[in-house]
Amino acid sequence: MSTPRRKGRSDPTQLGPKPVRVAAFLGSDASDQRSNKSDLSPPPADFWSPALDSSPLNPFFGGGDYTLPYDRVRTVRSPLGRTTPSLPNSPSAVQNASTVANPQSEPTAPTFFDKQYFDEDEAMSEARRQFLRTYLGGVLLTVATMLTVFLIHWGAVRNVPVEPLNGVVVDFDSGVVGLNVSMAILNTLNSPNIAWNYVPAASYPLGSASLADVVWNEKAWVAISVNADASQILNDGLLFPDSDYDGTLAMTVFFNEARSQSIFQSIIRPQAIAVLDAVILGFAQSLAVQVSGSTTIPSVLSTSPQTLVQPVSYTIENVLPGNRHISSIATSAGLLYLLMGSFFIVMFGHRARNRSGLNKQLRLRSLIRLRFASSFAAFFFLSLFYSALVKILKLDTAKTYNRSGFLVLWMLNWIGMLAVGLALEVVLTLIGPCYLLFFSVLWAIVNFAVCINPIDGMSRFYQFGYAIPFYNMSQSVKTIALGTKNQVGLNFGVLIIWALISCISMPLAQRRARSRYRRRCAEEEEMKRIQCEQGPGAASLTKRTK
C-alpha cells in the first residue's frame, strides 16, 4: 500500500526518469492515488482557460491521461528554497510550456572573447565597420589638428616682422649735423625691418623729451632725436678745442624694451645700432675731409682728438626696461598654466556631475546654476593661488597700481580664466569630452600664438589676436608689472565680453544637449522594441537605414 502524500507537496526530485502526472503538480486530491492510474480523471472543464487549451504552446494539456516526462517539466524554486512546479495558469507556466514546445528558443548566456577579427558573421562585420569608422575618423581629425596647430604657430614666428616696424627721426638741430644725420638714416639699407620716418621738430614742441612719450605710448618702436645745438657744439669744438667734448650729446635713441623683449633684442636694438654706427662713421670721414686744411687741426688732435675721431655719437635711453623672468612666466607660459588649470576644472566638473547622476536628475535651470557656481568658485580660488605663486616668484605688482597691484592681477587672472574656461564648458556641452581635447589644443595655440610676437609685426591674418583673451591678459600683466601703456580697462572689457558670451551660450548648449539626450533615449527604446518583436537583425538593419 502506497504511503499517502500531503496535498500540493509533491517532490519531483524523487520521481527519477518516470513519467510525472500533471495532476500531481496541480495540487489535486488525485496525487494521493497515483498508484491507481485508472482513478485519475481530467481536471474540471473550467480549470484551463480556452486560450490556454487551444494554444499551440500547450500541446500536452488536451484531455485524458496528463502525463509528461519529468525531464521536460520546469520547476520554480520558492523563496524558502523548495522546488515546486509552476502553475499552468501563471506567466511562468506559459513560458515553460513555450520552452518545452521549442527547446531551441531557450535564452543562452552571452559569450565573450571567442571571435576572430575577420569572422564573417553579421555581428563582427558591423563591429569592424564601427571600429574602422571611429578609428580612421580619429586619425584624420588628429592629422587635421596637427596641421592646423603647426600652420598657426609657424606663421606666428616665421618672417617676423612681416612688414617693417615704425621708426621716427626728428631733427631738433636744424644744422649741418641734423641735416646730414637725418638724410643718412632715412637712406640707410642697414635696417630692413625698420621703416624710418622723418617727423618735423614742430610736431614735438617739448623737444626730445616728447619722443620718450611717443615710444612709451607705443606709437613708434624706436625714435632718434638729433638734439638741439648739436651743430653749434661741434663747430665750437673744432674752433676751440675742449678736452671735455662729448659727441654722444649729439643724438639720443629711445627704446621701449618692455613692449616686446624678443623684438627689441633681435630686431630693434641691433638694427638701430647698426644704422647709427654707419652714420657716425660716414659723418666722421666726411668731416675729416672738410677740415683737413684747417689750421686748428693740430690743436684739436692734441687737446681733444675725439672731436675728429667721433664728432657725433648717441646716447641710448631705454624708456621701459624689460624683465625676461616676467616675460616668460607671467605673459606667455604662465597663461598656458591657467588654461591647463581651466581645462582640468572643466573635466573634473563633468566627471563629478556624471558620477553623481546630477546630469540626469537636475532640472535644466538647476543644472546650469550648478555649472556656473562650480566654475566661478573653482576659477576664483585657482586664480588666487596662481597670483600668489607669481608674486612669490618676485613679480613686481606695485609698478603701476602700488599696493592694489596684486588685487588687480588676481581679478585679471580670474576674469581671464572665466573667459577661456567657460568657453571650454560650452564646447564640452556641444561636442562632448572625447573631442574637447582637440578644441583645447586649438584654443591654446590660437591664444598663445598672438602672444609670441607683437601683432603689428605679424601678418594681417593675426589681427584677430587683439580680441583674444591671452593677448589682453599679457598686455595687462605688462602694465601691472612693467608700467607699459595702460590699457587695463580695455583688456578687462574684452575678457568680460568673452565670459558673457559663454554665459549666454551655456544655457542654449545645455538645452540642446538635453534634447539630444531625450531623442537618443527614444531611439534606443525603439531599437529595443524592434529587437523584441523582430529579432536583433531587424534592429541593426533599422539603425543602418536611419
Image (tube, rainbow, N blue to C red):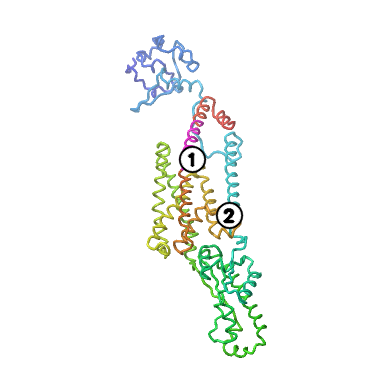
Q: Which mark is residue 509?
A: 1
Q: Which portion, as a residue range, is magenta?
A: 504-523
Q: Is residue 182 above or below residue 541?
A: below
Which amino acid, by three-letter code, is at mark 2?
Answer: Tyr
Q: Which mark is residue 93?
A: none
Question: Which quadrant does the N terminus fall into?
Answer: top left
Q: Quadrant of residue 398?
A: bottom left
Question: Which quadrant does the C terminus fall into?
Answer: top right
Q: Is residue 530 above or below residue 135?
A: above
Q: Which residue is pictured at 59% across the width and 86% down the height?
A: 239
Q: Nearer the viewer, residue 106 or 127?
A: 127
| Magenta span main SS | helix
Q: Is residue 509 above or below residue 377?
A: above
Decide whether residue 16 is among the magenta residues: no
x and y percentages locating residue 370 in the rendered image? 40, 42
Q: Nearer the viewer, residue 432 or 243?
A: 243
Q: Quadrant of residue 16?
A: top left
Q: Secondary structure at mark 1?
A: helix
Decide whether residue 514 is among the magenta residues: yes
Which amino acid, by three-letter code, is at mark 1?
Answer: Ala
x and y percentages locating residue 285 in the rendered image? 65, 81
Q: Quadrant of residue 405?
A: bottom left
Q: Of discs 1 and 2, which sits in the foreground? A: 2
Q: Is residue 267 visible?
A: no
The residue indicated by pointer 2 is 462
Q: Secondary structure at mark 2?
A: helix
Residue 522 is left or right of residue 279, and the answer is left
